[in-house]
């Protein structure tokens, strides 16, 4: 079983500053039985049940619905994916000189309840306390707090808890139930994020069941990526960040190749239908709006940078998962990318994620 990552030409890295704090802006944890050990006594009835089907497929039963369990990169031990073996996980990070991983969930990438806030609150609270304990055990593992958005008061409480316990972002999806990211319902959450100087990590995934039914097929991944594009479009054309001092959004695990199209689209929409999203400069639009994006090493970065600028792109490995976004050796690849300048590489590996996550 492969545990360590091979270095790609690590002996010739002319542009990499080894003294910088290197941040994996998108890593994952696979939920386990331990995730639910923080449920309160009155919440035990909501505890997900671990099931194994006749075909061997492992599932969670949540509120009468089945969701995949123990997903992820099978080349990595389950203890590493589920954060039971932090020492081995940290040693794998060391192979690519990664100092910090920012952890996103797996089960919660999709919506599992749309009309029972009590279940969403219970499971989010338990997950958040589990990740808080992981961070206390090893502070190299920062994390995105789950806000139970069906109850805004509870969501604010969880954000405040996360802020005090190692969370450096607030987890969202590009579509949250019936809400796009510019919906007035979300303003209290954005106000709290602005007050606490916390990032909003808009991760690939989907919180709308109808959308999932149309786009979720095993041979397609659009059900998770398309909401990212919808979320960016909603925010960019409505100029939400202009109402705040610190509010910033990161678009996580969707690559960056779409950025030029949607920046140009924001400009065209403003010109033709008068949206609030003014595009004064294509190159600085992301920075002007405090938008950040996790790139992939096979993106056409010289082209993307014309629209993203050098201060907004980050890099994530999707550690723990096994899908088209996974790239465990991404940091080594980027260090040896001769198509972009050393200052740009330094920003993508380090500075931009530090700024986004306020590390």
Image (spheres, rainbow, N blue to C red):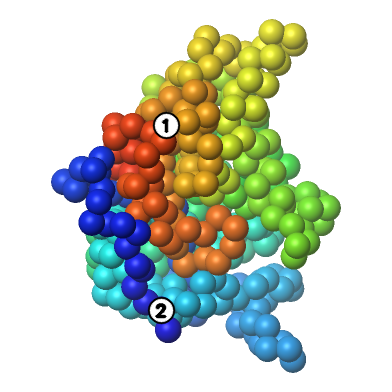
Residue name at image x 56 percent, y 13 percent: 279
Residue 147 position, x and y percent, is 51, 50
Residue name at image x 79 percent, y 53 percent: 215
Quadrant housing the C terminus: top left
Question: On residue 274, which mark appears?
Answer: none
Between 298 and 48, the one lying in front of the other is 298
Instruction: Identify the residue under disc 2.
Output: 2
- Dividing the picture into quadrants, the one containing residue 213 is bottom right
Q: Is residue 136 above or below residue 313?
A: below
Residue name at image x 65 percent, y 73 percent: 68
Relative side of 185 to 303, left or right: right
Quadrant housing the N terminus: bottom left
Residue 207 position, x and y percent, is 67, 51
Relative side of 64 to 17, left or right: right
Residue name at image x 69 percent, y 8 percent: 271
Q: Is residue 15 above or below residue 272?
A: below
Residue 33 seen by the camera = yes
Count residues near mark 2 (Cα–Cα under 10 Å), then give few for <14, some for 14-19, many for 20+.
few
Q: Nearer the viewer, mark 2 or mark 1?
A: 2
Helix, strand or loop at disc 1? loop
- Dividing the picture into quadrants, the one containing residue 34 is bottom left
Q: CA distance from mark 2 to mark 1?
A: 33 Å
Instruction: Identify the residue under disc 1.
Output: 312
Helix, strand or loop at disc 2? loop
Between 334 and 79, the one lying in front of the other is 334
């Amino acid at each position: 079983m492969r545990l360590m990552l091979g270095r790609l030409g690590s002996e010739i890295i002319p542009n990499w500053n080894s003294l910088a704090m290197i941040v994996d802006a998108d890593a994952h944890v696979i939920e386990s039985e331990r995730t639910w050990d923080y449920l309160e006594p009155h919440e035990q009835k909501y505890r997900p049940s671990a099931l194994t089907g006749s075909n061997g497929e492992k599932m969670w039963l949540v509120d009468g619905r089945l969701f995949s369990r123990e997903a992820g990169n099978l080349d990595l031990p389950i203890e590493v994916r589920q954060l039971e073996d932090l020492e081995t996980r940290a040693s794998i990070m060391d192979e690519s000189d990664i100092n910090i991983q920012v952890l996103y969930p797996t089960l919660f990438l999709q919506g599992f309840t749309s009309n029972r806030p009590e279940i969403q609150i219970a499971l989010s609270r338990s997950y958040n306390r589990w990740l808080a304990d992981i961070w206390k055990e090893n502070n190299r593992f920062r994390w995105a707090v789950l806000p139970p958005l069906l109850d805004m008061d509870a969501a604010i409480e969880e954000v405040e808890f996360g802020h005090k316990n190692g969370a450096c972002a607030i987890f969202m999806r590009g579509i949250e139930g019936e809400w796009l990211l510019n919906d007035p319902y979300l303003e209290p959450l954005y106000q709290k994020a602005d007050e606490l100087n916390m990032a909003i990590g808009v991760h690939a995934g989907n919180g709308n069941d109808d959308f999932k039914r149309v786009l979720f097929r095993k041979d397609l991944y659009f059900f998770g990526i398309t909401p990212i594009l919808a979320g960016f479009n909603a925010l960019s054309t409505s100029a939400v960040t202009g109402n705040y001092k610190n509010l910033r959004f990161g678009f996580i695990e969707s690559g960056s190749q779409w950025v030029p199209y949607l920046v140009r689209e924001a400009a065209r929409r403003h010109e033709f239908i008068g949206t609030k999203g003014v595009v004064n400069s294509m190159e600085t639009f992301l920075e002007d709006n405090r938008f950040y994006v996790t790139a992939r090493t096979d993106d056409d970065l010289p082209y993307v940078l014309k629209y993203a600028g050098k201060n907004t792109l980050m890099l994530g490995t999707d550690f723990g998962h096994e899908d088209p976004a996974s790239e465990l050796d991404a940091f080594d690849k980027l260090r040896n990318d001769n198509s972009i300048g050393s200052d740009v590489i330094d920003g993508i590996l380090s500075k931009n994620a530090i700024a986004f996550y306020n590390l």
